[in-house]
């Protein structure tokens, strides 16, 4: 996810652009840049780092001009560095472009463009767009807007783009598909941004572009909008309702809630380009060269911390179930100091949202020193862990700002599921029919998450019960034991209510002494191989007056009859249930924390990335 800003009018563009980037830095912050049109030239200034680094970088540069675009990046393709920062130039330096989204067919387009003599200066998918537009403009001698339209009709993927040209120095061309674009109206001026946060101080008169629409913004002219199929469209301006503070959170009161609600998209993004339903193929480009190493591994050792460790525990079930390869999951902080036995034919998988966790990094270095192959599953492109591992897969969840990890967890589990499915199919470990059934089930997950989010009001009711307690117990088995741990971590780290996750059967070995009418017990009791066992555990709790909050598969009446509160999730393959069962537990922790008056996005004593031991 990146932030784009554009301005054309009677003011100097640079101050508007820079301020807009600051407003959208939460959307991505690994590199930034501006392009400003001045007397039939375009000046581009861009650099690795945050918006403040760009502002510093531009101090001695010519940034004058009244038409410009700016971008703050969340790297998806290509490391965060100066070359990969946006804007990108056409070969003749007459056109510049910024982009938010993913061009899925960029490799195919790149090969064709290279054959036509285009030279690429970056590793980004975006650069394909600018050369494609340039190629179309030149070969078909089209005005910029038409060249953009023709070029985009060849593109598969998502985009929110703004294009400027020195041939049309007072015009912005804007196009949208799958990434947000808002156009703001000023007095003889236009503003463009990914969200209203960058516009609100100038105007609240806006238009939201729809998918596959292209707009031409020239001060003094009315807004012109066409579809990709060249059909004229009219838009009526509406009033931007939200406050600036809310806008930066996309209208949500906290980043954490926004990120919980982003999960249908972030899970879909973690599968994008990796799960081909038509061909029933799952492929992870980042680890292709290491598939054999994984399939012939003596062991898979997963190292991580916190929520990422819980995702690793789900990975253990996935890999052992589907690949029959032994898996160990280790807290990185324990692993690095216990002088572990590591074999050269081990494959170590490090999981980390931030890619900067010190203990996980240290575990990687130790594993590499002992000769193991080390792969990474990270959310931040170009992070230390991404660079330290031999290869890996990005989760593409977008920036996770809330300290409590939510969308990163479900994206990590999704990538682990994709990895297990891809390797199981290669190893012919599971019958084709079962494999196809699983692939189809995985593809449905984003919509099922959307459905679960509709039970938010019900979860809020449960949170109002939980908030008055000082303890809670989370129980789960098998695939959902890690979710019990994750649910407990969520509650305690943001509401400060103590919570413990436990294997449901382990209750009898001690914790059952805790059960009385004051102990809320959250039980994950979805359809599974151990369902009947979990029902018995619920009865054991009930017999001791424990309050039961159950997560069940929709339609389950038996557990509902035993429970004080019930949340239903849609039916799916057992191995994917952790992605679904974690959603209500995220919401439960969030609402309890809000009701307890906690600083949800910045809980006490915590940091988003633990870069120290
Ligand atoms: C999760 O809610 C916590 N904020 C924390 O446990 C986190 O998962 C842990 O610090 C690991 O971080 P990483 O994924 O960035 O390595």
Image (cartoon, rainbow, N blue to C red):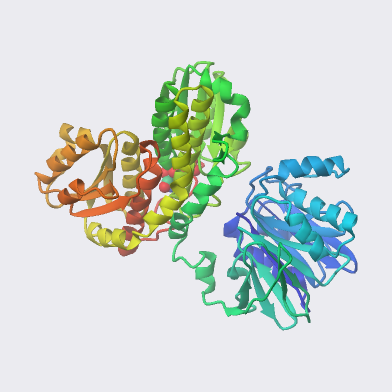
Q: How many marks?
A: 0
Residue at 55% x, 51% y: name it. Answer: 398
Left or right: residue 358 versus residue 220 is: left
Q: Position of residue 595 (x, y in %)?
A: 31, 64
Examine the image and state in which quarter residue 204 appears: bottom right
Q: Is residue 385 visible?
A: no
Q: Position of residue 233 (x, y in %)?
A: 68, 73
The answer to which of 522 and 154 lies nearer the viewer is 154
Q: In which quadrant is the N terminus drawn?
A: bottom right
Left or right: residue 438 versus residue 567 is: right
Left or right: residue 518 versus residue 215 is: left
Q: Position of residue 150 (x, y in %)?
A: 78, 58
Q: Is residue 28 visible?
A: yes
Residue at 80% x, 58% y: name it. Answer: 96
The answer to which of 217 and 253 lies nearer the viewer is 217
The answer to which of 116 and 220 lies nearer the viewer is 116
Q: Is residue 596 above or below residue 438?
A: below
The answer to which of 453 and 591 lies nearer the viewer is 453
Residue at the far bottom: name it: 187
Q: Position of residue 449 (x, y in %)?
A: 42, 52
User: Where ligand 1 lies, by image quadrant?
Assistant: top left
Residue at 52% x, 23% y: name it. Answer: 347
């Amino acid at each position: 996810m990146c932030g784009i800003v554009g301005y054309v009018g009677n003011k100097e563009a640079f101050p508007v652009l820079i301020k807009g980037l600051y407003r959208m830095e939460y959307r991505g912050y690994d590199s930034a840049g501006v392009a400003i049109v001045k007397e039939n030239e375009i000046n581009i200034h861009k650099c690795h780092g945050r918006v403040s680094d760009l502002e510093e970088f531009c101090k001695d540069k010519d940034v004058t001009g009244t038409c410009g675009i700016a971008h703050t990046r969340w790297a998806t393709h290509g490391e965060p560095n100066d070359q990969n920062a946006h804007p990108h130039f056409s070969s003749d330096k007459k056109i510049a472009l910024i982009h938010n989204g993913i061009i899925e067919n960029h490799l195919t387009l790149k090969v064709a463009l290279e054959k036509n003599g285009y030279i690429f200066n970056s590793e980004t998918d975006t650069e394909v767009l600018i050369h494609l537009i340039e190629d179309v403009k030149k070969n078909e001698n089209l005005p910029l807007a038409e060249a953009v339209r023709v070029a985009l009709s060849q593109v598969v993927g998502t985009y929110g783009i703004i294009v400027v040209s020195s041939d049309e120095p007072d015009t912005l061309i804007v196009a949208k598909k799958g990434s947000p674009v808002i156009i703001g109206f000023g007095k003889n001026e236009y503003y463009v941004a990914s969200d209203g946060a960058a516009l609100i101080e100038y105007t609240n008169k806006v238009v939201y572009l729809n998918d596959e629409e292209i707009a031409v913004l020239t001060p003094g002219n009315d807004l012109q909008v066409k579809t990709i199929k060249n059909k004229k469209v009219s838009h009526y301006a509406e009033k931007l309702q939200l406050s600036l503070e809310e806008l930066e959170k996309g209208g949500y009161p906290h980043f954490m809630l926004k990120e919980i609600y982003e999960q249908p998209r972030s899970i879909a993004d973690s599968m994008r380009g990796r799960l081909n339903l038509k061909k029933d193929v799952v492929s992870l480009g980042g680890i292709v060269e290491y598939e054999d190493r994984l399939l012939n591994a003596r062991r898979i050792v997963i190292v991580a911390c916190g929520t990422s460790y819980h995702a690793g525990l789900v990975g253990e079930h996935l890999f052992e179930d589907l690949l029959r390869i032994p898996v160990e999951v280790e807290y990185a902080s324990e692993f690095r100091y216990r002088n572990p036995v590591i074999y050269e034919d081990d494959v170590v998988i490090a999981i980390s949202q931030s890619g900067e966790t010190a203990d996980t990094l240290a575990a990687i270095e130790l594993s590499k020193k002992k000769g193991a192959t080390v792969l990474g599953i990270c959310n931040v492109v170009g992070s230390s862990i991404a660079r330290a591992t031999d290869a890996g897969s990005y989760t593409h969840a977008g920036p996770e700002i809330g300290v409590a990890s939510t969308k990163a967890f479900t994206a990590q589990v999704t990538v682990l599921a994709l990895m297990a499915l891809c390797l199981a199919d290669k190893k012919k470990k599971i019958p084709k029919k079962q494999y196809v059934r699983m692939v189809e089930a995985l593809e449905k997950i984003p919509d099922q998450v959307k459905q679960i989010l509709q039970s938010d009001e019900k979860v809020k009711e449960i949170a109002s019960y939980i908030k008055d307690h000082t303890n809670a117990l989370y129980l789960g088995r098998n695939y959902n034991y890690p979710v019990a741990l994750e649910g407990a971590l969520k509650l305690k780290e943001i509401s400060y209510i103590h919570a413990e996750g436990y294997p449901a059967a382990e209750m009898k070995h001690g914790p059952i002494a805790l059960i009385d009418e004051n102990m809320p017990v959250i039980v994950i009791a979805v359809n599974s191989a151990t369902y009947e066992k979990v029902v018995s555990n619920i009865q054991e709790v009930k017999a001791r007056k424990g309050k039961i909050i159950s997560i069940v598969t929709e339609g389950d009446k038996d557990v509902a009859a035993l429970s004080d509160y019930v949340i239903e999730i849609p039916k799916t393959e057992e191995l994917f249930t952790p992605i679904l069962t974690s959603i209500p537990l995220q919401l439960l922790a969030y609402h309890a924390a809000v009701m307890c008056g906690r600083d949800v996005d910045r809980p006490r004593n915590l940091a988003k990335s633990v870069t120290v031991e």
